[in-house]
Image (tube, rainbow, N blue to C red):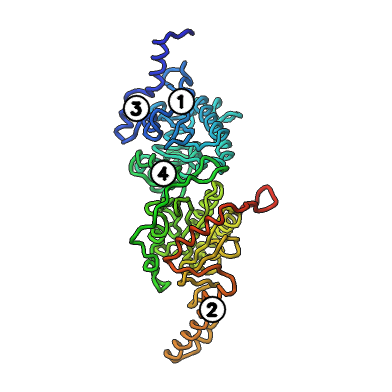
Amino acid sequence: MTLDGEALEQLRKRAKAGGADKYHAANAAKGKLFARERVALLVDEGSFVEDGLYANAMAEGLPADGVVTGTATIDGRQVCLMANDSTVKAGSWGARTVEKIIRIIERAYATGVPMVYLVDSAGARITDQVDLFPGRRGAGKIFWNQVRASGSIPQVCALFGPSAAGGAYIPAFCDVVAMVDGNASMYLGSDRMVEMVTGEKTTLEAMGGAKVHCAESGVGHFLCKTEADALDVLRTYLSYLPANWTQPPPAAEAKPAPEKADLAALVPASERQAFDMRRYVKGLLDEGSFFEIQALWAKELTIGFGRLNGEVVGVVGNNSMFKGGVLFVDSADKAARFVQLCDAFNVPLLFLSDVPGFMVGSAVEKQGIIRHGAKMITAISEATVPKICVVVRKAYGAGLYAMAGPGFEPDATIALPTAKIAVMGAEAAVNAVYANKIAAIDDEAERAAFVAAKREEYERDIDIVRLASELVVDAIVEPHELRAELVRRFAAARGKERHFAKRRHGVTPV
């Protein structure tokens, strides 16, 4: 087939136009952009170079086979990307769709640049299953490549519509997922399939909508109001990470902490009184630099990126505003994954401890709190990036271990004057040791005096100066001195040797 210039231009226009006008109109009515509009909104103007534009060009109604792939720059930095075109058979996958996705992930991995997934797909085309599903270059190869690339290059996903069945694993294998509220969903089986198989009557939104995954399952990381917001999230997220695992995170111009930040005033004297660790983090880091991740899920633990004197750090902090800052199954998982992410991409870790410990009771034991806690402690043990533990107020029980305490080779353990480190709090300890004796004292005043005396004795035993004298903590720092102390200590740790163990990999308590 010979093409003259005009014929080639017509072919190109048809491929770039996507599906029929009625499908574009239906998407627009839902507030959804065309796949190519999403790409243009995300990347630097004029930087996109497309591959596979003419995939399935001989077929009727399958322009580019329903997926846009290629390379571009975001803020001047190279990326690879794919974008499902939901105007073409609802963004479903055919054999060439799959091949295009495989090829672009392979390119990202080979060239060491981030991989961006703009997902809006109904999943595999059942009519084409033999061609796209089972073979060596079938859909499974997408996931194999994602797993191989994990920790080597950043992989980020914005979800604008459905990500169905096996296709739901594309977001699951990404570092972070931004979901557009009201349109985005992830599910292994549709609502009709669920009813047929289990008898349960549900809806896609109730089962796998954006709010469900960002607040309940933890598969989603950012709940976004609009598609533009989701694309902004990806752009911001990538600004904190290197192109690949061999490079340091990109530094930025240093900014001071907020002028009005008074870290001492943010921490109540009584450990019974909650405070918002997010405010503390924002007061400590460069102004406006804190970028919280998974803000709606497992809120008893706050995680995110920020900058100290322009340098990127990953922050893990207990938030007593939610469930007292106690660690649960989900918060342990949240911490473990974030620590692994930071360690993979050379992001130093700052732990801000105000933790009563792990939750106890039959409910969490049945959920596997020991297993999940072990997963968190494993991740912190294996992390070889610079890591500093700051005991802001308390670190009790295994919570000290989970927040990179002295036994986990932090580059420093710093205590604020308000810090307490112990197996448990004074009240619990006195009750555990003297419960029978307390119960035997009939006089209320005498009983209160006895308890107060034992509490005071316990507090003296765990006095922070005593712990510093025993080299449990490396420094006691006033709140107004903490930021400068961290800047100096992270700078000193920047060139540390990062070998951990003689092995291929550990056996993670998943």
Between circles 1 and 2, the one closer to the viewer is 1
**What is the CA distance from the residue labelled 1 to the residue labelled 3?**
23 Å
Disc number at residue 50? Answer: 1
Q: CA distance from mark 3 to mark 2?
A: 67 Å
The answer to which of 400 and 55 lies nearer the viewer is 400
Cα–Cα gap, marks 1 and 2: 67 Å
Q: Amino acid at mark 2?
A: Ala
**Considering only order in the chain, which callout, 2 or 3, is on the residue closer to the N terminus?**
3
For discs 4 and 2, the disc positioned in front in the rendered view: 4
Q: Position of residue 182 (x, y in %)?
A: 34, 42
Q: Which residue sits at x=42%, y=13%?
A: 8
Which amino acid lies under the numbered mark 4 shown in the image of this protein?
A: Thr
Q: Which residue is mark 3?
A: 23
Locate residue 203: give its quadrant: top left
Provide the residue designation for mark 4. Answer: 236
Q: Disc 4 and disc 2: Cα gap in Å?
A: 48 Å
